[in-house]
Image (spheres, grey):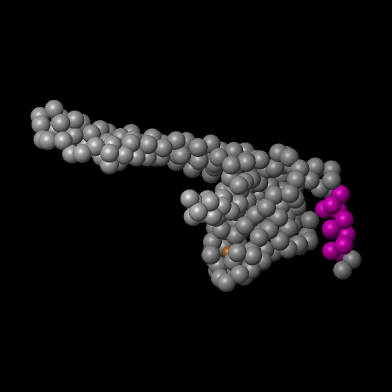
Amino acid sequence: MSRVVPLTLLLLLGCGNASGVLNPRGPIAAHIHELWWLLFLLALLVFAPVLALLLYALFHSRAKESAPRRDVERRLVVGGGLVMPIVVLSAVFVLTIRSTVELSKQPTTDLTIQVIGHQWWWEIRYVDYGFDTANEITIPTEKNVRVELQTRDVIHSFWLPELSGKVDLVPGHTNAVWLNAKEAGVYQGYCAEFCGLQHALMKFQVIALRSDEFENWARAATERAAAS
Ligand SMILES: [Cu+2]
């Protein structure tokens, strides 16, 4: 018991970064959240019977060989070893393909932002306005924001759990992810690919502002950039 409490606390602390996955605040994250629950339930469908059989085997001594027993064993092998994997893996395959198709659809773009990964920070370029920031991405709510992802050194991964899935930044290649925040607020983002000694510190924030507030902010930032 003395070890259970610290271990449980350690596991819960490990969930800190992933909390946003279970709290989606945009359409892409909501879709991933739904897929996560479906896969979890399918995994439970396999795990629960296996655990039940394991407990049964632990607490019941081996019975003598008999024709009815062999019949039960045959049914277990065919049902658990053939039918169930086919049903579960087919369901996982269909769900995965459905999500891949859904998430690869490209919505109309209201705003384009370039994000460039560096060891160990994020360069943000507002190409529609002509100014840059670092480690902080400001977006308008209820708009489709296309984020173009590049890297200047190694592979990084852009992960904003409450709004989108993970997308890698690959040298010599441009990937893209769409953000659409339903509510104004601050969303925490992470690099999800080990990229060197300070990888764990490579975080960023997305600040979602109402459209009119975003336009005021962008105008002021453009003026500051022009004056400097
Ligand atoms: Cu990293």
Where the C terminus falls, by quadrant? Answer: bottom right
Picture mark count: 0
The answer to whether residue 165 is seen in the rendering is: yes
Residue closest to the eye, 110 or 138 = 138
In the rendering, at what x and y percent does residue 84 appear?
Answer: 30, 35
Which residue is located at x 60 percent, y 60 percent? Answer: 191
Residue 224 image position (x, y, % from top left): 87, 62
Q: Quick one: which residue is furthest to the top in this view? A: 68
Specify the quadrant of the image occupied by residue 76. top left
Over which residues does the magenta segment extend?
Answer: 216-226
Q: Nearer the viewer, residue 204 or 5?
A: 5
> Horizontally, is 53 left or right of 191 in the view?
left
Instruction: Identify the residue at image location x=84%, y=46%.
Output: 213
Q: Visible in this render: residue 167?
A: no
Q: Is residue 179 found left or right of 172 in the rendered image?
A: right
User: What type of secondary structure mainly makes up the magenta span?
Assistant: helix
Residue at image position (71%, 52%) is: 206
Residue 217 lies within the magenta run: yes
The image position of residue 113, as x and y in percent, is 70, 54
Q: Left or right of 2: which side holds 203?
A: right
Image x and y of residue 147, in percent: 65, 53
Residue at 60% across, 56% down: 158
Nearer to me, 165 or 76: 76
Viewed as shown, does residue 74 lie left or right of 173? left
In the rendered image, residue 181 lying in the magenta stretch gets the answer: no
The image quarter in which residue 27 lies:
top right
